[in-house]
Image: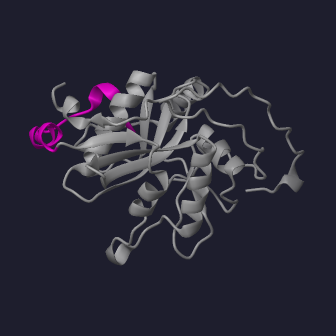
Amino acid sequence: MSSPQDRPRRLARRRAVPPVEPGLTRPPHPVPPSSWLLPDPGDADDDGVVGIGADLAPGTLVDAYRRGIFPWPHPGVPLPWFSPDPRGVLRFEDLRLSRSLRQTLRRSGWTATVDQAFPAVVAACGEDRGPAGTWITGAMARAYRRLHELGWARSVEVWDGAELVGGLYGVQVGGVFTGESMFHRRPDASKVALVELVSRFRSAGGRLVDVQLRTDHLASLGADEIPRARFLAILERSRDHDVRMRTGHRPVARLGTS
């Protein structure tokens, strides 16, 4: 990745910020231009690595996510940036609820919110997970908290009364939500968070949930893979849409009847 000395510095785009409506997620605020020239995602290597280095400033992160690139720290190497091919995605119509998950939704008595405990969700996602540890370093956590303050990063929380039992967080670029991490303190609570995200994001006019890489866990919920070029085309068409989710408490039981 090159520094700003290698190219003319771009002027910050002035973009009107829509007014905040009660009960809706905040619109994203404009950020300074990136100080780094991120390579074209189509030039990624066979592992999906686009480049190495750069920083986690808001301008860098927003530029990356708007272009279908995300950071994924690996121990002992400078920060790698990825745009995998194929790309893991969850289409709304492909969401699958197992019988046991439907029972959890109907019987748990849990509620869910959006953007009500972002720092707590990030902290829970970053808790030590055994020998493998976590890729959510202190610097990563701080960077995404800053993105949240600017209206670009969002969280979904699952509550048992006043106790946070599950959740997820990610970056929203218009009609595409890129999930970064999820956690659970009760069985199925992270899955419930994802189902809640799909429900609210779809109702708000969202287009797609980007899961980056399909895992067995996500595949059980309906996640699939599409070619990177197709994902980037969807992102380009959707990234400037004004999509704002409802934030207040809702019972998750309603999700088990659909």
Q: Please state if 85 lies on the left or on the right of 167 as rendered.
A: right
Return the x and y of residue 113 as percentages of the image width and height.
37, 40
Return the x and y of residue 44 as percentages of the image width and height.
58, 49
Q: How is the image coloured?
A: one colour
The residue that appears at 55% across and 33% down in the rendered structure is 232
The question of residue 56 being in magenta is answered with no
Q: Is residue 116 above or below residue 243?
A: below
Q: Nearer the viewer, residue 164 or 94?
A: 164
Count of numbered labels shown in the rendering? 0
- Quarter of the image where the N terminus is located: bottom right
Return the x and y of residue 127 as percentages of the image width and height.
39, 68
Residues rendered magenta in the picture = 88-108
Q: Please state if 240 lies on the left or on the right of 202 as rendered.
A: right
Q: Is residue 31 above or below residue 232?
A: below
The question of residue 102 being in magenta is answered with yes
Q: Nearer the viewer, residue 214 or 115?
A: 115
Q: Is residue 120 above or below residue 115?
A: below
The residue that appears at 54% across and 61% down in the rendered structure is 141
Residue 208 falls in image quadrant: top left
Q: Please state if 81 lies on the left or on the right of 108 as rendered.
A: right
Q: Nearer the viewer, residue 132 or 173?
A: 173
Return the x and y of residue 242 as percentages of the image width and height.
57, 24
- Quarter of the image where the C terminus is located: top left
Q: Is residue 41 visible?
A: yes
Q: Please state if 221 lies on the left or on the right of 23 as rendered.
A: left
Q: Is residue 91 visible?
A: no
The residue that appears at 80% across and 30% down in the rendered structure is 14
